[in-house]
Amino acid sequence: MAKFQSLHDAVRDNLRDGDTVAFEGFTHLIPHAAAHEAIRQGRKDLTLIRMTPDIIYDQMIGMGLVRKVVFSYAGNPGVGLLRRMRDAIENGWPRSIETVEHSHAAMANAYEAGAAGLPCAIFRGYRGAGLKDVNPEIRSITCPFTGEELAAVPAHRPDVAFIHAQKASKRGDVLVEGIIGVQKEVVLASRRAVVTVEEIVDDFDDLHPNLCVLPHWTITSIAHVPGGAHPSYTHGYYERDNAAYLEWDKVSADRDLFMTWMRKNVLEAGPEAFAERVKGL
């Protein structure tokens, strides 16, 4: 059942050293504030799962929290490389990390399998692809009905999921609008789920019944963090901060500049700073 907490307490109570964790959001609703709190609390030896890792994973990797990343495509969206991730892979700074790469289809199917309580995902994919030659988790299975060869990958079952959403009701139900991505599946696949939201409302009585609503019994903790997806956007609240993504390309290219930026904007800041950053967007 959903518990309303501060972001500090929600991370403290739900994210532990060595956990497998997913910070999910696709294009918008990326839970930057939650990731920053994990950095401030100094979590370590995390296995990160994410479709299209972007700058929040770059920041967590650069701060030494991560030992392994399971992902499909990694990059600063619309800009270029994840330079802190690349530095860790190529040079072991600040530590070496293990990587497990999948296709987008494999990641989405693995979340869906985890949400359904299945041990693996089975789908059409990877035919003629070289990725299966370097990822031993990609296997083949023969359909017992048709004889067709299909791809199989382990289900994603994170210890904890973090997502951002527009609204939570006072009962603890969560409303997600706009591009849904895999937020629903990651919450259902995870043992614990933390949601940061733009606002808390009495109920959803005036909303269309076919909107995506995560019921309170699927959520562990809810934290009210306005602006918590910045610099990604939150549909209906603020736009994507393109300048911040361009700035990150320069900041992340230099280790000293990166550490200076992290001290100012993460270690010495709090979740309340996100509300200020989205003013005027």
Image (cartoon, helix red, strand yellow):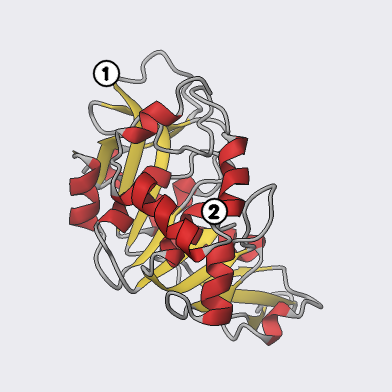
Picture quadrant where residue 14 is located: bottom left
Q: Residue at x 30, y 20 (%)?
A: 203
Q: Residue 52, image x and y in percent?
A: 59, 57
Which amino acid type is marked by label 1? Asp
Q: Residue at x 26, y 63 (%)?
A: 42
Residue 263, numbered circle: none
In the image, 230: left or right of 42? right
**Residue for point 42% across, 35% down:** 165
In the image, taking residue 251 as reference, residue 246 lies left or right, namely right
The circle on residue 251 is 2
Q: Which dot marks residue 202?
A: 1
**Element under label 2?**
helix
Q: Is residue 146 left or right of residue 93?
A: right
Left or right, 7 with respect to 78, comes to left
Element carrying mark 1 = loop
Give the amino acid type for the residue marked by disc 2 in the picture.
Val
Residue 137 can be seen in this image: yes
**Residue 199 against residue 80 in the figure, above or below:** above
Could you give the CA–CA distance between mark 2 and mark 1, rounded to whole angstroms? Answer: 41 Å
Residue toward you, 124 or 226: 226
Q: Earlier in the sequence, mark 2 or mark 1?
A: 1
